[in-house]
Amino acid sequence: MKKIAVLTSGGDAPGMNAAVRAVVRKAIYHNIEVYGVYQGYQGLINDDIHKLELGSVGDTIQRGGTFLYSARCPEFKDKSVRAKGIENLRKRGIEGLVVIGGDGSYRGAQRITEECQDIQTIGIPGTIDNDIKGTDFTIGFDTALNTIIESVDKIRDTASSHARTFIIEVMGRDCGDLALWSGLAVGAESIILPEADYNIQDIAEKIQHGIDRGKKHSIIIVAEGCMSGNQCAEELTKYINVDARVSVLGHIQRGGSPTGVDRVLASRLGGYALELLMNGETAKGVGIKDNHLTATEFDLIFNNDDTNKINKRMLELTKELSI
Ligand code: F6P
């Protein structure tokens, strides 16, 4: 292995820079040349590929976003478009590609591996959603979680002053992890997420019960994959007469300096991805399970029907703690 490339793709996540840094620094340490592909798969097609040096990743570990830029690139599903990207790697003699992103990004890497045996691919899970199979945590999840906690703590102050019910809509696509973890961490009265049944009438009665026994405010966390905050407010006020406000946290959840947990995770996964490439491995996503580094075939990641991977005990606990 003499030359590799790295790209970030899909929605950005805090800690992506730390992962790129780990890949670049470890590669150079092992005398491997590294190229950065700018703007994800779009840059691969457009030949926006540039050599990275040790200094290219200096002063990046603490920065949110991705200095390689990111994009969603549906055109990459097209074989003839993909061929251009593959040609751009081949003409530089690049033999390995590290893709940092979500499972849509892994699919692009999988297709490259299927179409050319001379380019190995390894995926690193980078998304705030924590929705990638084969890892307990994705890079960016912890930072987004802390951003939500910080925001809700602030909202709680005004909720309490005005004795209001706040509905906070959080990201996560079809995964409820951000809602569940943040809900537990802020002591939310109710959490609504896609992986578990919910009943708005029950939630409304619970809020009313709280008000009746003197509670000054209530917090409901709703995962975007389940319904919007506004929908939730509309449903809720069918059953109770509360002064409800909705706060959609939006893209603020994707920004900011990565937490220590995300920086360490990104560095470990970046280093491990490089190790796998050097060992001749391909078409695998790296991850962390019970604090051990793991590598899972893309096929298993895509076909793993572990759709309800929400931690049921944690969800149960949130109910027990918010009576
Ligand atoms: O996948 C990350 C994510 O932030 C999701 O939580 C959210 O649904 C989506 O991306 C938003 O995408 P965009 O930035 O393209 O609006």
Image (spheres, rainbow, N blue to C red):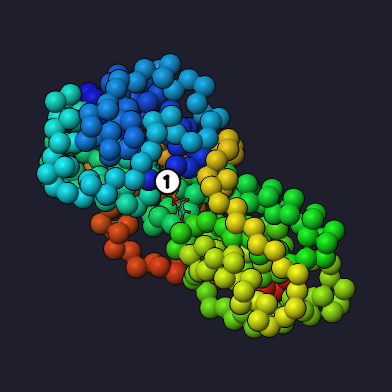
Residue at 72 percent across and 80 percent down: it is 240
Residue 58, horizontal then vertical, whole percent? 48, 20
Residue 294, horizontal then vertical, whole percent? 38, 48
292 with respect to 27 (left or right): right
Q: Quadrant of residue 279?
A: top left
Whether residue 263 is visible, yes or no, is no
Given residues 28 and 36, the one toward you in this image is 36
212 with respect to 60 (left or right): right
Residue at 27 percent across and 27 percent down: it is 48
Label 1 neighbour load within 10 Å: few <14, some 14-19, many 20+ = some
Residue 274, horizontal then vertical, whole percent? 33, 33
Whether residue 169 is visible, yes or no, is yes
Q: Quadrant of the C terminus?
A: bottom right
Residue at 65 percent across and 62 percent down: it is 246
Amino acid residing under circle 1:
Gly
Residue at 42 percent across and 46 percent down: it is 11
Give the vertical position of 306 relative to 60 (above or below): below
Residue 254, horizontal then vertical, whole percent? 52, 45
Task: Tally the marks.
Answer: 1
Q: Judging from the image, what secondary structure is the residue with disc 1 in?
A: loop
Tag 1 residue: 11
Give the vertical position of 125 relative to 51 (above or below): below
Q: Quadrant of the N terminus?
A: top left
Badge 1 residue CB within 8 Å of ligand 1 = yes
Given residues 121 and 209, the one toward you in this image is 209
Given residues 165 and 273, the one toward you in this image is 165
Q: Quadrant of residue 220?
A: bottom right
61 with respect to 125 (left or right): right
Given residues 304 and 241, the one toward you in this image is 241
